[in-house]
Image (cartoon, rainbow, N blue to C red):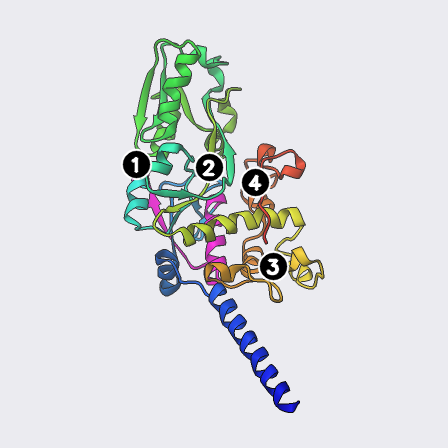
Amino acid sequence: MLKRFSVLFVLVAMVVGVFSVATAQETSVTLGPITKRVLDRGELICGANKGGLAGFAVVNDAGEWAGFDVDFCRAVAAAVLGDASKVSFRPLEAGERQAAIQSEEIDIMSRNTTFTLSRDAVWGADFAPTTFYDGQGMMVKADSGITDLLGLEGLTVCVQSGTTTELNLADQMSLAGVKNYTPKTFSEAAATWDAFVQGQCDAFTTDKSGLIAYKGSSADPSQYTILDVTMSKEPLGPLTPQSDPQWADIVRWTVYGTIQAEEYGITSKNVDDFLKSDVPEIQRFLGQGDNAIGSLFGIKNDFMVQVIKQVGNYGEIFDRNLGPDTPFNLGRGVNDLWTKGGLMYSPPFR
């Protein structure tokens, strides 16, 4: 009887051992090339807006990069490296974006870049979830008397070259019945704005977020009027090289995590309280206990804890850079949570 029990014990132990090895093999992850490079380097290289865009990416008085787009690079650094400050920013003009992604001189780009089919296919890029739903607009001088696109007949429009903005302008002016106008192109966003301010053009077109940023940061915002027209859909968000699907997943779920955190009501101020929650989905989201979340990507399971603590949830990021207490006073609109009538929605963390 004792011998029979011993044999049974050994068999059970072998089964448990095999299961444990199988489980370990299932959860062990080989690091992708970009993920490994970032971890080995101990720093994230982020492509940012050269010349800056107020509210989205600027170098502040302390010489530090700050803004809405910048914060998503910091969020990824917090997720992967545990430190939101471990980011090196690489300023890029619009025409430099494709080469920067394809050459992998950057790990991630977060630079008011529209998600389009051609960029997805030709650039060799993986787009993360949209962080800011935007649309192209048109700005004129307040004393011009212009109220719609037809009012630009025979006039000059400042537009940045190498952007979807340039292509949208031609399409929308044609649809509006404007038969004669002159687009004046510039390679840099700041130069495009300066030309408009100096009177080289009668109007200035870019994404509405950019128009609001330029107007809000100008010496006298009352001099400018943004027309009540939306000329395109411009879903903006981070993107990564296509060579590392694992890295793209890390960026994707970091962005989703900021949205889900806001939906749960988890903020940078109360995240420690939520760590004590006994709600299974909260524990899973925060990577507590035996929940395998980040380890599926080769990073720590509690990666979202660091993201929220150091950078905040989506609402905190939005309000800090663009909200009521900023010069832009931008409403959430379609960038609100889906539970509040917006488009921000995260798939389940499970």
Name the amino acid type tagged 2. Leu
Residues marked 3 and 4 touching at CB (< 8 Å):
no
Q: Of marks 1 and 4, which one's residue comes earlier in the chain?
A: 1
Residue shown at 60%/36% (left/top)?
332
Where is mark 2, residue-wise? 236
Where are the magenta residues, as a range?
67-96
* Cα distance between the residues tagged 3 and 4: 30 Å
Q: Of marks 3 and 4, which one's residue comes earlier in the chain?
A: 3
Residue shown at 46%/32% (left/top)?
210
Q: Of marks 4 and 2, which one's residue comes earlier in the chain?
A: 2
Name the amino acid type tagged 1. Gly
Name the amino acid type tagged 3. Leu
Where is mark 4, residue-wise? 326
Q: Of marks 1 and 2, which one's residue comes earlier in the chain?
A: 1
When the figure is inspected, residue 309 is found, relative to residue 116, above or below; the finding is below
Q: Which mark is residue 95?
A: 1
